[in-house]
Image: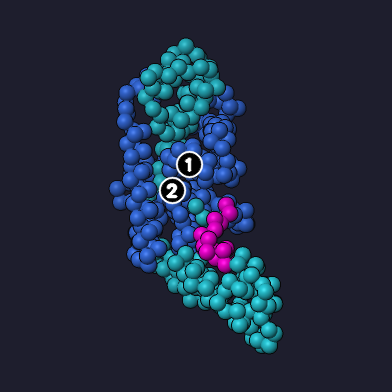
Chain colours: A blue, B cyan
Amino acid sequence: MAWGRAEAKPLAGEKRHLKQMSSHAEDLALVEAFKRGEESAFTALVIKYREAVFRVARRMLRSHEDASDVAQEVFIRVHRALPRFAGRSQLRTWLFRITVNLCLDFSGRRSRDVLTGLKELMWEPSPHDNPVELSERRELGDVVARAIDALPPRQRAMVVLRVYQDLPYADIGQIMGCAEGTVKATIFAAFGKLRRSLAPYVTGVSPAGE
Amino acid sequence: MERAVVDCREVRDLLLEVVSGTTPPDLRRALAQHLERCERCRHEAAALEETAALLRSAAEPSLRDGHWDAFMAGLDRRLQAERRRPLARLVRWIRTPLHAWSTAAATAALVVALMFALVGGEAPARVDSPVVQSVPIQGFMTDSIVDALPAMNASLSVWKAGFGAIDVPYDTAGGD
């Protein structure tokens, strides 16, 4: 990354903000429609957010089927509680809060080893995959997934929300029920651990850390 | 407006933002200026950047064909099962703000009717009570009903505020 390339994306933040505002307005319209009895509005919300919810759950739980179960449970709870949703927070933030809490509960209860069969579930070859690339991708994906999995659950949740969902720290704070500063400090600590776990794959970093 | 980076600690926070998301241009410029003169932060930046890049490079695998069809079918089944549970249906119905008013009125009417049935309407109305004088159903107002009025009023005000609108505490049940 060129650190001095400051003008590379001059409006990225503003564009993202506008997109979020527009998405929030759309969510509120769908929620109001659902409150009026339009069940199709709920389906539209599910279609809009199912992938993000599922992917967060899968990164958290490392199991395709558990992630599917949790994602469905998220939307069932949303369906139950949506009539009371007043729009004070963003629907997306609320959804992720339910997702993360369910994943944390689920992780705590889970006793079986979800790594069994993980590779088969997670890495399905496509006809266009080069076998060598596929093998490397699998290995790297597995190493990264294991490194993330080794983090304490709350750290893992914050890293997943930040790195894979690109959520602002303030939103992560709302989701996790803590201050923005706490989120930053936690993610920074998590990056330190990940750096050590992934040392063989990061040039110039010794396995010891620095 | 150009923003100055003051110390390495702030740089650390900024580095985290840069490697894990988008950062406003002025902050990136300030960060770059700091990194030009601080070797320790440069080293930190390189390691963070590589770690973030590695995490991102572990791309999401593609989902199996029919994954979302199966997901939606499963969700639909679970929602149908949920709807079939009478208690869940009742709770959902009551929690809908539009229904709260009618539920409150029906509950209040039921309470009054029950109390009236229990005392059998035998006791004479306490006509000197200002509460009794203010309501048009003096003939039904027994002492026990008058005594219960404050509690009934309190319950009614809770319903009016919208039972379903009460914020659910921060838990997995949700609530915004």
* Chain containing mark 1: A
Q: Could you tell me which residue is drawn at 46 percent across and 30 percent down?
A: B17
Q: Nearer the viewer, residue A45 or B68?
A: A45
User: Mark 1 near mark 2, Cβ–Cβ under 8 Å?
Assistant: yes
Q: Residue at x 55, y 77 (%)?
A: B136
SS category of the residue bearing label 1: helix
Q: Is residue A27 left or right of residue A73?
A: left
Point out the tag, 1 or 2, that comes first from the N-terminus: 2
Secondary structure of the residue carrying tag 2 is loop
Q: Is residue B68 visible?
A: no
Residue type, label 1? Asp
The numbered dot on residue A171 is: 1
Mark number, residue A90: 2
Region in magenta: B155-170
Q: Residue at x 30, y 51 (%)?
A: A127
As drawn, B113 above or below B93: below
- Amino acid under disc 2: Gln
